[in-house]
Image (cartoon, rainbow, N blue to C red):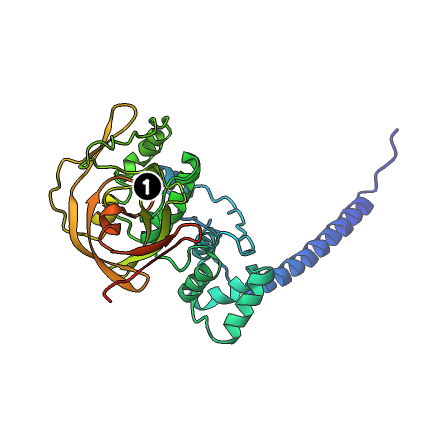
Amino acid sequence: MPPKVDYGEAIAALTAQIQDLKSTVESNATTINAIQSKVDKLPITPPFSPILVPSISQNSSASGSSALSNYPTKPPRYNLTYFDGTDPQSWIFQAEQYFQIYAIPAQQKLTITSFFMLGEPLTWFQWMFRNHQLTDWPSFARALELRYSPSGHTKPQVALFKLRQTSTVAQYQKNFEILANRVQDEEDDVSGFSKSDESMSFSLASLPLPHEPQMLSDSDPNDFQVSLHALYGQSSLTTLKLEGEISGYKFTVMVDSGSTHNLIQPRLAQFLQLPIEPAPPLTVIVGNGETLRCLGQVTNLPVGLQGHEFSLDLYLLEVRGADIILGMQWLSQLGPMLADFANLSLTFVHQG
């Protein structure tokens, strides 16, 4: 026979276990209430919302942007590179994007900028800041560009206009993009093409160059002759280069005894909005059969040279040597002169 069960003892044991469980539950409830009380005292924070970084591209689709915003992913961390004195325009652009992403207040931009300067630029920043030369971010950006850009003191519009291809098309395109980025509200015709055609213009510029021009015969005294130095900017013992001024703008002038006429770049005439008059059908024959035609003339144009002003008649012709070419048409009007091409000097009497 199985042993007789004492139900009284079993009930007493169960009662003790239930009492222990009850005590444990009450203790846990007390702990939970204490934790909840501490949580209730914490400051309320808004739910996480992803940072939407503004897109640089102006052509991104609205549907794509809305789709990305539905996924609360952790935003990436953006770092601003340190400025070491090279390429100030690119660094200023990145700094402005950095300020926009992190919504940096205007009054804090200069303070934050001081942590991203290295070496000599940091020394320059300290001097400018302590001497109260930097008042806000725009003034700092302009001062930085003037200090560290090779062409900081030249108007970007003028530098862009005077840009010439002297080596490869790729290097010319690079220089063009650097200058174009500095031009505010750039006009669509700045490069002679619309903005959508710029890539095509650089592709066309990559084509092989035509043969060197052939000068017209010396037998006809009325020939329109332009030397290779004027056409391609080659220096020689018969040319002088100096700086000229028209309406406050400075340009390169080449004195060339090998050219018969005075010439001006058509783009320069257009830039200065000079009145262009019809000209005789003067041409330069190119080796592949093409011709460079005179596009008109500008008369009585005041040009400043070495502190003196001359009234010049100029023909419009696409040359690369300089902005303005002064040939025998000008030299023959100076009277007796002393030319020292070895020392690059020309001496004559002007207006007594």
Indicate the position of residue 197 as horizontal and vertical percent values. Answer: 28, 34
State the image quarter where residue 167 is shown. Answer: top left
Residue at 64 percent across and 58 percent down: it is: 32
Q: Is residue 79 left or right of residue 20?
A: left
Q: Residues within 10 Å of mark 1 (few under 14, many from 20)?
A: many
Q: Is residue 250 visible?
A: no
Q: What type is the residue that disc 1 sits on?
A: Ala
As rendered, which of 28 and 274 lies closer to the eye?
Answer: 274
Question: From the viewer's perspective, is residue 212 above or below residue 103?
Answer: above
The quadrant of the rendering that contains the C terminus is: bottom left
Left or right of residue 334: residue 164 = right
Residue 239 in the image: state x and y as whole percent.
36, 46
Residue 28 spot, x, y in % from top left: 68, 56
Report the front residue among 342 and 187.
Answer: 342
Q: Nearer the viewer, residue 94 or 56?
A: 94
What residue sits right under mark 1 in the picture? 230
Which residue reaches farthest bottom? 131
Towards the viewer: 32 or 163: 163
> Is residue 191 something that shows in the picture?
yes
The residue drawn where x is 31% and y is 30% is 213
**Is disc 1 placed on a helix, strand or loop?**
helix
Please identify the residue farthest to the front as the structure is shown.
336
Residue 130: % across, % down: 53, 75
Residue 295 in the figure: left or right of residue 10: left
- Count every numbered label the image shows and give the total: 1
Quarter occupied by the N terminus: top right
Write down the quadrant of residue 243 in the picture: bottom left
The residue most toward the top is: 288
